[in-house]
Structure formats: C-alpha cells, structure tokens
Amino acid sequence: MTIAPAKAGWRFRQPSVIPGFGLTLGFSLAYLTLIILIPLSGLVWRSAALGWTDFFAIATDRRTLNALEISFGAAFIAAAVNVVFGTLVAWVLVRYRFPGRRIVDAMVDLPFALPTAVAGIALTTLYAPNGWIGHLLAPLGIKVAYTPLGIVVALVFIGLPFVVRTVQPIMEEIDKEVEEAAATLGANRFQIITRILFPGLAPAIITGFSLAFARGVGEYGSVIFIAGNLPYKSEIAPLLIVIRLEEYNYPAATAIAALMLLLSFVMLLIVNLAQSWSRKRYG
Amino acid sequence: MADPEIKSYEPHHESQSAAVTESLPVRLLLMAVAFAFLVIFVLLPLIIVFHEALAKGLGAYTESLSNPDTRSAIRLTLLVAAIAVPLNVVFGISAAWAIAKFEFKGKAFLTTLIDLPFSVSPVISGLVYVLLFGAQGLLGEWLKAHGIQILFAVPGIVLATVFVTFPFVARELIPLMQEQGNGDEEAALSLGANGWQTFWYVTLPNVKWGLLYGVLLCNARSMGEFGAVSVVSGHIRGLTNTMPLHVEILYNEYNAVGAFAVASLLAGLALVTLVLKTLLEMRYGAEIAATRGH
C-alpha cells in the first residue's frame, strides 16, 4: 500500500528561509499599480464611460478606420518583410563564418538602440526624392518618403531586431547531426531546409513576426517624419490619437487607444493559436 | 557509458560537409543579400545622421550644439534619465527578488503584467497620464486646486519615461536570478548573514553584469523615448523639450544641421550602448540572462 503524502492546505506561497518576500513583493506591486495599472485602468474606465453609441461612432469614423487599417496593414507587411530578411540575416550570422561577423551581429541591434525620432529623420532624408536612396528610386517612379510605402520602410527598420533575435538562438540550437542524417538518407539541401530546418524554426519565426508586428502597430516616432501624414492616406493610428488630443477631443483619443489595445490583444490571441498549431503540426 | 573516444569526435563548424551547407555560390548570394539589406536599412540611416550633421562643417555643428535651447534639452534628458533609471533599477531588483526567490500564486500573471508596457504604443503610454492628470483628467481639478503641475512639466515627462522603460531591468534580472537558484543565499543565511548582507554580498555580485545590461538598455530607451514623452511634454522650448523632441522641432523648422547635430548625439549614445552591450555579451555572456530581444 502506498501512503499518500499529507495534504497541504492552500497557501499563497511556499515556505522559504529567504527573507524579504513581503517587502519586495509589496513594493513591486505598489509600484506596478501606481505606474502601470492605475493609469491603464483610467483609460479603460474613460472609454467605458463613453457609452456604446459614442464609442461605436468614433470607432466607425472613416478617418479612424483608415488610420487603423494603415497602422495594422503597414505593420503586417513590414513584419512579413522582416520574417524573410531577418531569418536570412540570422542564418548568415549563425551558419557562415566571415571577418567582422561580430560587428554585423551588433549592427542588428541598432534599431533597438537608436531613438525613434533619429531613425525617422534619417530614413526620411535617405528616401526623400533627392536623398541617397530616393534619387535612385525616383527615375523608376517609386516614391517612398511621404507615402504609405515610407511607413513600411520605417517599420521594417524598427522590427528587424525582433525577428533576428528571436530566430537566431533557436537556429544555434539546431542539431547538425539531424541534417547530416537526412543527407545520408538521400535528402537534398532544399528538402532538408523545408522538411527539417523550417519546422523547427517555425514557432520562433511566428514569435518574431508577432513581436515585430506588435511593435510596428504602436510605433510613432520613426513613422511620423516619413509618412507625410495625410488623413485617410498615410495617417497612422497613434498619430490620430495625438491629433485628437491636441484638439482636446479626449473621448476620441481614448476610444482609438482602447480600440488599438483591443485589436492588439486579438492579434496576440491569434498569434498564440498559430503558435500552438505550429507546435502541433511540426513539433 | 559513452566511449570518450567517440564523444570527442565532433564535426567542426569550419569544415562542413557539402551535404549540410549550401554551395559556395549560394552562400555568397545569401550573404550578399543579407549584407545589402543591413546596409540599406541599418547602416545608411546611421551614416546619414553624421553626414547631415556635418554637412555645413564642424563650425556649424558645434554652433548648433551650443544653442541655449539645445543645451537645456540635453540637461533635461540627462535629468529625466537620472530619475527614471534608478527608479526602475530599484523596482527591477525588488520584483526579481520576489519572483525569482519565492514560489507564490499568481507569479506568472505578475510577470506578464511587468511586460505590459512593451505591448502598449508609446503614444498610449503618454495618453494614460493625460487622462489622469490633464485639465479634463480624473485628478485634474484636484491638482489645479493645489497648484501641482504634472502634465507639460518635468514630473509628467519622468512618469511617461518610467512607464515605457518599466520592464527593462526586471526582465533582465528575473530569468537570471531564477537560473542561479537559491543555493548561495541559503548558504549565506545559514552561516549567519542577515537578509540585507545576503543581498549585498551574495546576490548582487552574482547578478551585477545582468543588472548592468538591463541598466544600459533602460538608459538608452529613457534618453531616446519620443512618443510617450511627446504626448505629455507640451513642447515648451527650453523647459519641457527633451533631446528627441528638440530634434523634431528643429527638423520641422527646416534646421537640418541643428536637428541632425542633436540627433548625432543620440546616435552616439546608441553606438556607445551597442558597444558596451556587445562587450558585456562577449565577456560575461554566461552571467547575463539568456532571454534577450528588447
């Protein structure tokens, strides 16, 4: 017969000899509540106080819808571009040896470290019709600065490290022996990449995509310089919030912000579902 | 038991068999595409900042940096970082201690809450304080009656900066301290150290490089934050303009040299941050938490 261990009562925390639990948790919770939770719940409270009809009217306003569409659309395209090139950059950094690899590796983090306003004016100057890149694209009829394409360019810059830094560590962990085994069994390189490598990387790629996408949706500083900010055409949702605030139209600003948070939350949910699907499919 | 002879045989990275790598032309092509992408999207934006800043010579550059408004923007940025970073360091250490050293209910939820500011648009981070402290805000009347200015003043800028840089130190320390476990602390306590001594002489030396790493990222973001600060600052020249906001004002006034001169200081800060970060990763990679990304 087995003896069941004595059933422990419900306890908030496991006993420990280490002191300071009450102090550190108490301080952390108080600080978190003051800085993050109270202000954020203020936003929720204010948008709830709007009432359904007002909220609906603001949410379905043409300008709001266009701004949300531009923010989410541009962020989606930029994240997709970063999935392709970010994965490629990660591959080159992990698998190939070349002089200056560490510098190239460090360069990937520049978009994290460079303040967004600096990135904004730098990209705008590069892609303006007379800029270093802009003047090469102008004869081809491609306009980047002051168009929605400019928004995508800025978001590609901002999102790059998210994809590279999520995919890179997983790539490093891939066991080369599995590839060798596949090769000895007659798989060609293309089959190895699509059947062996990609399935292992898929969850990381999805995570990288979602991080880059989430960052892109909320991005403000780097975008407003290059976007041109034409209402209905190249106006992003965060900018519309700022514009409504400057008009002292607090209800509209609040409603758009609440809508953005809601949409981001839904996106996060979808990504999590895709994540668990890819784990089931490939895991 | 594994045969040591067999175990020591490991394929070298450098000498790969053709089956598990791409052919040379493919490799060169992939590298060329990756480098071209990085040059266009990362290197050129960095270069053009310094190029534009020095477009009219060194004299114009130093002159625009000695402008009183620019000087006051630099001072304000340093002041805000000097308040926001230590606040988040104290919070980060305290949260990491509670989360990494103890098992309690709702720990995962608390960890998620700490990361919350990363998933909120910077503009919304500023907006929440406007809704709280603004003239039409929840506390607006009370603040006005007591003559306390938070919005369009330094306290608002500090609060917005603290909000956006909130997770940096905590998310660096939590996984690191979890990885290290409680053994060292328990040994120190059993030898008679008190809680404070244990933290100061045992825990802190164990996590110092991870802490420095978090401080580095926290500082870079707090000096460079634009969206959140822009919403709460009121853009009063010489008073509530931080360096990134000053870059915007000068740029919109078509003062390209001035804007890029201030931008070059921020780009310099980014470069210093990257160099220090890389050095930390090279030297103390094992002593910095494995999770990175922000």
Image: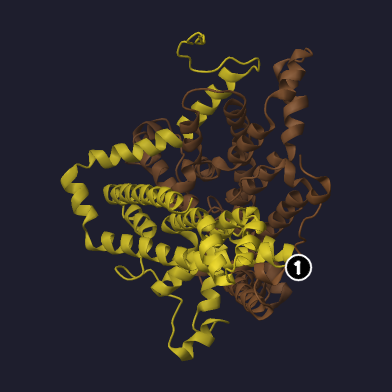
Chain colours: A yellow, B brown
Dot 1 falls on a residue whose secondary structure is loop
Could you tell me if residue B67 is visible in this image? no
Residue occupying the far left of the picture = A53
Image position of A233 (left or right of A113): left
Q: Is residue B150 above or below residue A246?
A: above
User: Along the horizontal axis of the image, is A72 left or right of A216?
Assistant: left
Three-letter residue code for mark 1: Gly
- Quarter of the figure with residue A213: bottom left
Measuring from the top left, give residue B229's x and y in whole percent: 49, 50
Q: Residue at x 52, y 40 (%)?
A: B155
Residue B183 seen by the camera: yes
Q: Residue furthest right?
A: B5
Q: Mark 1 highlights which residue?
A: A100
Q: Position of residue A186 (x, y in %)?
A: 59, 69
Expressed as whole percent of the image width and height from the top left, the position of residue B237 reads 53, 56
> In the picture provided, is B171 more to the left or to the right than B274?
left
Q: Residue at x 36, y 36 (%)?
A: A41
